[in-house]
Amino acid sequence: MMKKSLFFMIAFLATFTQNVQAVDDMDMMLFEPAPKITASKKEIKNPQKKSISPTADGGIIIKPQIISDAEFENIESAFDEDKNIQTNPSEPTFIPKKNTPSNNTKTQSLTDAIKKTAEEEGNSSSPLAGTWVEKLAEKALSPSSDNDDETKIGSISLESMVNDSKNDNRRSNASVFDISGIMLRMSLPQAEAAMTKRGFKRISQKFEIPNFIKWRFEEQCRNAGVVGYERLANCVVKAAKDNNHQYVESEKFVKYDTQEEITINLTSNFTRNKIYKITYRSSSMRKNQGSSMKAQYLRDIKVYDFWRVVNQKYGVPDNKEDVIWGMGGNKPYMKAATGFLLLEDPMLKELDYTRMSREDQKYMNTNLYNF
């Protein structure tokens, strides 16, 4: 059996070998040899970028420009880095954090900021080294001897230092105060215009002649033969008007709907008839008389409102016990009480007396003595 199988295998191999040889022995005239296929390398053209250039007519021409090999390699390397970032998500990238100012630095004072800058950069590298700002910061940050237990370095701000310097020995300048628009050293027409604008009406006006001039004119009128009190007074007034010695000494204004009264006093014509004293009175608090709770309540409201307006307009008084604003001495001052205000300039009144005294000395030479 084994012999038969070997025989069939030998016969099959002999037949297959003959077929292969027949293919190799084919006529070359009938079948041309197949051409040999080879792949040639294709030249890679560089991408182009565009540039803009103006024309003579004012237009724009977009010209392509060739990208260099170095720029093309940078582009490819950028794409490779993006691929690496996308393919490796497990490796986080570190982004440095910018030093942004916190909310606390916005509210820091100038001295705190100077101190922080000095600590971070050092005194040698600080841009404020050796300047007046650095000395100011050192003075502000130094603990005081009065409050050793409560001092905290850096707690004193520049604003508090300025406020303390302003509040030390503060004195109000009462010469710039006004009462219902009337100020010291105003003329009479200016005061009357201010009163009319505020709704006040003049109810009285008093004229005056300096005493030393009045007495001189009385003697002259008697020597001229004037007899009688009324005739003598009229003679003195006429002589004073002719010599411009009669002046308005005081005027009183009233506002009936609010029950307010203002009196002004003026100097003589030797100081051009200026206001040196203003007196204000309000009787609205006396309107609600009685001892009932309602009357007391209404009076308290008016008293409170009066002092509220005073504090709002003139501020805190320099002398809280006597309620006086002013610089002291013979300088202008203002005094207040419930329903009462007094604004006075003693220096102007004293100047008026001085000038009248100088005028009086001119009458000393009477030429009555010839011995």
Image: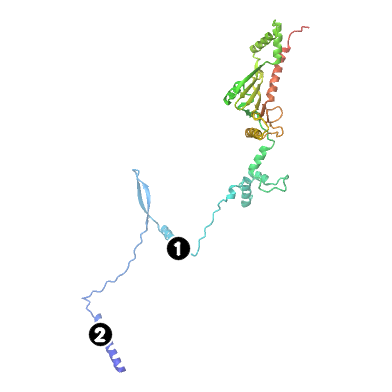
Q: With respect to residue 280, does 75 lie above or below?
A: below
Residue type (three-letter) at the residue carrying disc 2: Gln
Residue sitting nearer the eye, 328 or 248: 248
Measured as percent of width and height from the top left, residue 310 is found at: 64, 32
Which residue is located at x 70 percent, y 13 percent?
214
Where, quadrant-wise, is the N terminus in this rendering? bottom left
Q: Are marks 1 and 2 in contact (CB under 8 Å)?
A: no
Residue type (three-letter) at the residue carrying disc 1: Gln
Query: Which residue is the extreme one toward the top?
Result: 225
The quarter holding residue 338 reads top right
Measured as percent of width and height from the top left, residue 202 is found at: 61, 21
The disc label shown at residue 86, or none? 1
Where, quadrant-wise, is the C terminus in this rendering? top right
Left/right of residue 147 with respect to residue 42 in the rendered view? right
How many marks the image carries: the answer is 2
Left/right of residue 101 with respect to residue 7 in the rendered view? right
Residue sitting nearer the eye, 32 or 206: 206
The quarter holding residue 258 reads top right
> Secondary structure under badge 2?
helix
Q: Looking at the image, is mark 1 or mark 2 nearer the viewer?
A: 1
Visible in this render: residue 352? yes
The disc label shown at residue 18, or none? 2
Measured as percent of width and height from the top left, residue 319 is found at: 70, 33
Measured as percent of width and height from the top left, residue 89 is found at: 48, 64
Visible in this render: residue 131? no
Distance between the Cα atoms at labels 1 and 2? 61 Å
Classify 10 Å Cα crowding around label 1: few (below 14), some (14-19), many (20 and above): few
Sequence-first disc among 1 and 2: 2
The disc label shown at residue 39, or none? none
> Secondary structure under badge 1?
helix
